[in-house]
Image: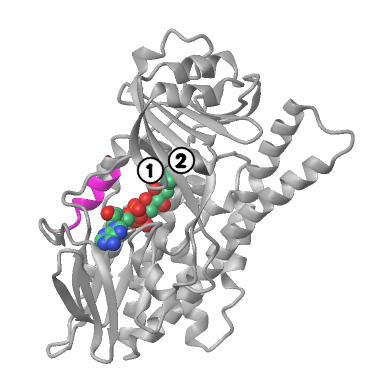
Amino acid sequence: MTIQPQPQETKIKVAVIGTGPGGLAAIINLLRLPFVELSAYDQASELREVGAGISINENTWRHLKLLGAAEAIEQYTKRGDGSKIDTEQRNGNTGELISRSFQKVDPEAAPRSRIERYKLQRALLGQVPPDFIQLSKKLAKIVELPKGIELTFQDGTTAGPFDLLLGADGIRSVVRQHAFPEHKLSYTGKVAYRTLIPQSAVAHIPNIPQSACFWHTRNTHVYTDPLDNGLFEIATRADEPEEDVKKVSWGQKVKKDQVIHHYDNYCDTIRQIIAAPDEWLEFAMFGGPRLESVISNGHIALLGDASHPLSGAFGSGAAFAFEDAYILAQALLYTHQRQKPISEALVLYDEVRSPHYKGLYEILNGFGVNAKELNAISPPLEEQDYINERTRRNWGAENRWIYKYDVTKVWKEYTELADVGEDISALTLKTNKEAEQQSVPVISVEA
Ligand SMILES: Cc1cc2nc3c(=O)[nH]c(=O)nc-3n(C[C@H](O)[C@H](O)[C@H](O)COP(=O)(O)OP(=O)(O)OC[C@H]3O[C@@H](n4cnc5c(N)ncnc54)[C@H](O)[C@@H]3O)c2cc1C
């Protein structure tokens, strides 16, 4: 994206709120646009990631390359010879294997990697000038005025006016709350417990898989993964009634006693794995309905978890945020080159991204339908058959387009059609279909 700045060009003033994967990707993309004057804020006093690992999927990888951050991640990736197991799906109660995929042979194909979250953050931060992000700036208030958007932070300072406000402030987005006050998050009834321990702490456990493995039961799952750096990741889901959950719990340390009883019904291997760590991090999972539109008033756009509170579903939220940031920057460039207003860039952004999120929410709804259908079978399925069948249905090949989805291709086709004034509404769906046809039958779940 090389553009020559116009000598007397008035820059557009853009504020990014939040510097998780989405905000950082937005910053990197927008700093490449010479007609943008960018400011970025985060509530944190220092940028550090909580949680454990994060999967770098094929679509994540594509954007890391575009963001200039792939090289820093490459060292943590696994390129196989096709014989090594990549991921397994097992029945959590019995340990029975449901499916298995193997590492990719093609050296050009995206390698699998599961890394600690801070490594992804560090790779992205490496592309942002030092001290560019203003820290300890918790956004408290947004005022939309004719001259632009003014921001007030919790420390009493203000900033603005801005021509464009980007809400990359995560699932509990203040920007979303301002733009769509009727939108409500709710507790999903699930918590995630996550930890990293030395592999030596679990090496003695019989049948411990040497690859990433999802262990499914009727309502929850456990993910185990021996990482390359000698650590062993355990990431779980547990049903936890609302009254037992601290609503703010996000990365809170909890003791093993709070965790292990949730996994009593799992097979012996998992019970032993779960008993190994003394301490866990707890994350109460919140989600919310899909927003019909991710833009507001021609000068506010949401991206990343702020735009789609999917509660970590699909284990690819970083990639979705990167896709958002890419399209947003492309749309601003496209309209700038045609001397069109920012509001038109936001419409393009919304037209590309909202149908994608619609597709993702439809898959989630499909999970509910699958459960209903399986529950309606008479005579009822045996517990193990139920788990195996639900895993196959929810995480079979038909949902793999998510990870194949190439938003750069969508954008190219979109603008070609837009330039000749054609209807573009069916384009995202068409691209999803194509990605689906290329898909391989591998199963993956959020970890
Ligand atoms: C349990 C779990 C497992 C997951 N596993 C994966 C995985 O394997 N792979 C994957 O790709 N994704 C995964 N995800 C999803 C991924 O973590 C998120 O989608 C991703 O972090 C979203 O990035 P973001 O930048 O939109 O938001 P966040 O990462 O939440 O960042 C938001 C930023 O905004 C800042 N902020 C918030 N409010 C304010 C405010 N008022 N003022 C200023 N700053 C503010 C925060 O400090 C933070 O830095 C998982 C999610 C969960 C919950």
Q: In which quarter of the image is the N terminus?
A: bottom left
Answer with left or right where residue 407 lies relative to residue 30. Answer: right
Whether residue 413 is visible, yes or no, is no
In the rendered image, residue 243, in percent from the top left (x then y), is placed at 50, 42
Q: Name the residue carrying label 1.
A: 249
Residue at 58% across / 34% down in the picture? 220
- Asked whether the residues under the numbered discs 2 and 1 touch, taking CB atoms below 8 Å apart as contact, a structural biologist would say yes
Mark 2 lies within 8 Å of ligand 1 (Cβ measured): no
Q: In which quarter of the image is residue 127?
A: bottom left
Q: What stretch is highlighted in magenta?
A: 119-128
Work out whether 229 lies above or below 336: above
Give the Cα separation between the discs numbered 2 and 1.
Answer: 7 Å
Whether residue 193 is visible, yes or no, is yes
SS assignment at label 1 = loop
Q: In which quarter of the image is residue 18?
A: bottom left
Q: Residue furthest left?
A: 131
In the rendered image, residue 329, in percent from the top left (x then y), is placed at 33, 71
Q: Name the residue carrying label 2.
A: 245
Q: Nearer the viewer, residue 213 or 176?
A: 176
Asked if the magenta segment contains residue 175, the reply would be no
Residue at 23% across / 61% down in the picture? 138
Asked if the magenta segment contains residue 123, the reply would be yes
Dominant SS in magenta: helix
Mark 1 lies within 8 Å of ligand 1 (Cβ measured): no
